[in-house]
Amino acid sequence: MSDETALLKSIVAHPDEDTPRLVYADWLDENKPDTVPSPAAGPSARAEFIRIQCRLAAGAFDEPDYPELLEREQDLANWLSTHDPEPDVQLYGLDRQEQFEIGEWADCRRGFHEVYFFNEYGDSTEETVDTLASSLEEAFRRTPARSLILDGATTDEIVQFSEQKVFRQLRGMYIDYLDEGDEDIAVKAIAESPNSSGLRRLYFDLPIDESGYRALAESRYFGNLESLVLDYPISARSLKRFHGVKWFRNLRRLQLWNGAGDLLRTLADFPPMPRLVSLSIEGDITSNAATVRRFVASDSFPRLAHLGLLGSRLQPELVALLAKAKWPLRHLTLDQAQVGKAGCEALATAPFARNLRVLCLRESAVTAGGVQALADTSTFARLRHLNLAGNPIGPGGLAALAGSKRLGALRALDLGRTNHPRGPIAARHVVEFLSSLDMPELRHLCLDGLPVAVRGARVLATAPTFANLTRLQLQQCGLGNAGTSALAESITLPNLAYLDLFGNKVGSGAGKLANPKVFPKLGHCRLGHGVPKKTVWRLNRRPGIVV
């Protein structure tokens, strides 16, 4: 048995432990370096990917390099998917993503493929469950994957599967809609099964009624559960069932979809959840000012490092109240809120602002005045990722970012879809912005939908401030053949690992990308239409390029 085989067997035998994975990463650096240029800082991209994912899975919000870990994970995943994919283990009835997908419930976790999809439903419940159980037993013998997604199973199949011994070896369970049967019975079966004691992550994407929530709250077998996602509207009344429940109080990550009632008030009244570091709530938040004050002042989340309010529609005055929170936030997401200028001014003075590393305000009515408030404050000195996608920031917003002395250390900036009728941006504004931007640490830049055009592409290709870019997104930016050629001829973008030019008439200018010496670390490149057939043939010979 080779050293590598022995190391991989150790990972399979101890899937819950990081040590065998980290030992394997060290071995890769010493014995199996990358054979083509990669975005890795060391000899092996896979080794670095394993280490980064282990740190993120453990919860790295407080780490000084947390934003960098997010960037590196994405860059390495793109590159590995093209240049060093994990060998596919053929298992009857089980599929997995071919790519290194990342995210809390994506395919890859702690450096290895983690999630299987079951697809071999039989003519009877018994046939389906037998196939699923035997396929998982084989998967557990051969791979470290310990998570399963069931999409379209029946209630009876879930009930019988939860009684199988192999269920106890699962660490993650994701149940999508049921093909037939009663959702509450299926949920109750999982909650009451002793085999659920091995679960660390649980995801329900189906409607649950009171009897199902009661069964979950009363479960004696969720003591090891760390992450819970209820991706279907839950009412405040139903959520109250978890008040004081021991296993619920020990969660590290919680994601809810806001249903009827005031979810924020219910959460504010919960006893302390001392391990909770990540809380996400999706859907309209109809709370009044008194409730938001109560939520902010609550002692329920003393360690909260990541807060995501998605599609909340929070008004500026409520955002201002939220900004009074004293949580140790490192990562804040307010998607589709009404943040506006007043909300940005409030966030700039928030107690957590000085330690915030990632701020996402996607589609949150942020105008030029709001951007100016973010750009002028010294409290965001540690901010490294800023997402303003979908906001009508106008030329004034671009100018505020370019002239900011406070945001010069940003590593990721997303300005996609910011060319809005309320603040139209012309090509000259983009050129002025790119020409005056002074963010030398920038790694990820998204300009999707902005009129970058040929002149803007030439600035991107030559300006020193973009020399460290590893990810560049330029969808529908009017580059044309000349703009694409300018990028491909750049000698100042040697670190690009991801390039998206979809929606541009790239023409024959894209042909230069067929040369592996152009962007030598490239892992993925998506091109638009208008590529001549002869050029397509040349491009298809280079791994990672999608026409």
Image (tube, rainbow, N blue to C red):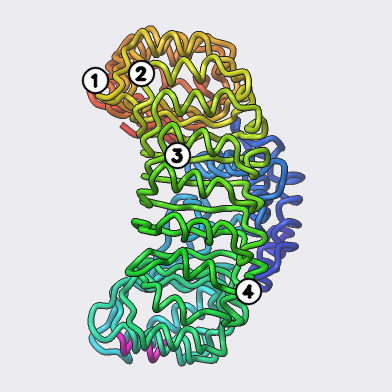
Give the magenta part as a residue range.
155-161
- Check disc 2 and give the amino acid type: Gly
Characterize the local packing of mark 4: few (<14), some (14-19) or many (20 or more) Cα atoms within 10 angstroms. Answer: some
Position in image of residue 339 (x %, y %): 42, 39
Please identify the quarter of the rendering in which residue 69 is found: top right
Marks 1 and 3, how far apart at CA: 39 Å
- Check disc 3 and give the amino acid type: Leu
Marks 4 and 1, how far apart at CA: 58 Å
Q: Which mark is residue 532?
A: 1
Position in image of residue 166 (x %, y %): 52, 85
Marks 2 and 3, how far apart at CA: 37 Å
Task: Tell whether label 2 touches label 1 (CB within 8 Å).
Answer: yes
Q: Is 72 on the left-hand or right-hand side of 14? A: left
From the viewer's side, name the closer residue of 215 and 462: 215
Position in image of residue 45 (x %, y %): 63, 42
- Comes first in the chain, label 4 or label 1: 4
- Image mark count: 4
- Comes first in the chain, label 4 or label 2: 4
Marks 3 and 4, how far apart at CA: 29 Å
Q: Which residue is mark 4?
A: 250
- Comes first in the chain, label 3 or label 4: 4
Q: Which residue is mark 3?
A: 361
Say whether residue 6 is visible. Answer: yes
Q: Is 56 on the left-hand or right-hand side of 191? A: right
- Picture layout, residue 359 above or below residue 521: below
Q: Quadrant of the C terminus?
A: top left
Q: Which residue is mark 2?
A: 511
Characterize the local packing of mark 3: few (<14), some (14-19) or many (20 or more) Cα atoms within 10 angstroms. Answer: many
